[in-house]
Amino acid sequence: PENIVSFIENDIVKGLPLFNKKVLITAGPTYEAIDPVRFIGNHSSGKMGFEIAKKAASLGAQVYLVTGPSYQTVSHSLIKRIDVVSAEEMYKEVHNYFSSVDIAILSAAVADYKPKNVATNKIKKSSNSMSIELVKTQDILASLGSIKEQQFLVGFALETNNELENAQGKLQRKNFDFIVLNSLRDKGAGFNHDTNKVTILNKAGKTKQFELKSKVAVATDIVEELKTLLNKK
Ligand code: PMT
């Protein structure tokens, strides 16, 4: 019976629209260590990225899901999950896969700064205040934008103000094909919710605004946008 199921599955996959496509997806937060017990992180749950991964796999794509610390689970024969913790680890894993993929979608909330020095031992509570010197992390998306060849590159923008302007700036500076904007000003959008409200902006200056909907449905909208681009190629 297993052989029959696997034969049927393989046959079905061949007819799917993303069959033979390789998709790299980043998800979740990154944690930047301060000492062995503390880190700088953010509220990303990984839900958005995991839903995109599931959608792409359900359409036949081979998915590489590079995720920061997340409680999300996924079980699909076409999804390879790669767990990382820090921005530096995510940068390395993403670069390992990028040259072999057709599409990269960066939905992770990557730390922009990390502590310059990581204390070897737990920092003791000795004074009323303390300072931590931070240095910039490498921008994974910008780096992929500068080396990309045939790949489609999709970025996210998480904003709290001047949303459209900021997202357009990122789209132009980082050389990707479209950007998915979500704003923390929209109720039910962004971190940790099961819903999101996004606007997709493309290189040609076109903007598509979507209603608040489940992250499952947002993932479908993003993958549909990609399919349109792939068909035009
Ligand atoms: O995980 P969830 O709880 O479901 O939440 C989903 C989400 C809110 C995290 C997601 O929808 C989202 O907006 N992800 C991007 C968050 C973000 O870091 O946005 P940004 O505007 O700071 O970054 C712009 C882009 O550059 C993003 O594609 C980001 O992945 C990328 N980036 C940022 C910094 C860095 N060092 N390297 C990067 O590649």
Image: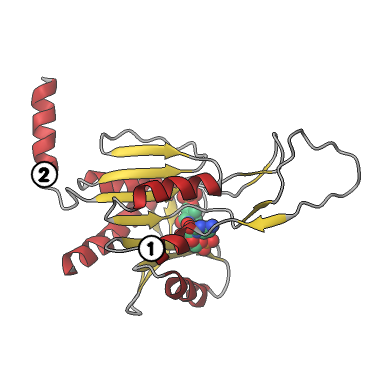
Question: Please, is residue 140 above or below residue 159 in the view?
Answer: above
Residue 9 placement, left or right of 72: left
Residue 171 placement, left or right of 3: right
User: Which three-letter amino acid code belongs to the residue tagged 1?
Assistant: Ile
Where is residue 22? Give x, y as percent: 26, 49
Where is residue 129? Give x, y as percent: 87, 50
Badge 1 marks a residue whose secondary structure is helix
Q: Residue at x 10, y 23 (%)?
A: 3
Q: Residue at x 23, y 47 (%)?
A: 61
Where is residue 29? Give x, y as percent: 53, 47
Q: Is mark 1 within 8 Å of ligand 1?
A: no
Mark 1–mark 2 contact, CB under 8 Å?
no
Which residue is most to the top? 1
Residue 113 placement, left or right of 129: left
Kindly tell me whether residue 183 is visible in this rendering: no
- Foreground mark, 1 or 2? 1
Circle 1 packing at 10 Å, graded few (<14), some (14-19), many (20+), is few
Question: Please, is residue 65 above or below residue 220 in the view?
Answer: above
Where does label 1 land, which residue?
A: 147
| Residue placed most toward the observer, 33 or 7 | 33
| Residue placed most toward the observer, 123 or 51 | 123
Badge 2 marks a residue whose secondary structure is helix
| Residue placed most toward the observer, 192 or 158 | 158
Kindly tell me whether residue 232 is visible in this rendering: yes
Q: Which mark is residue 14?
A: 2
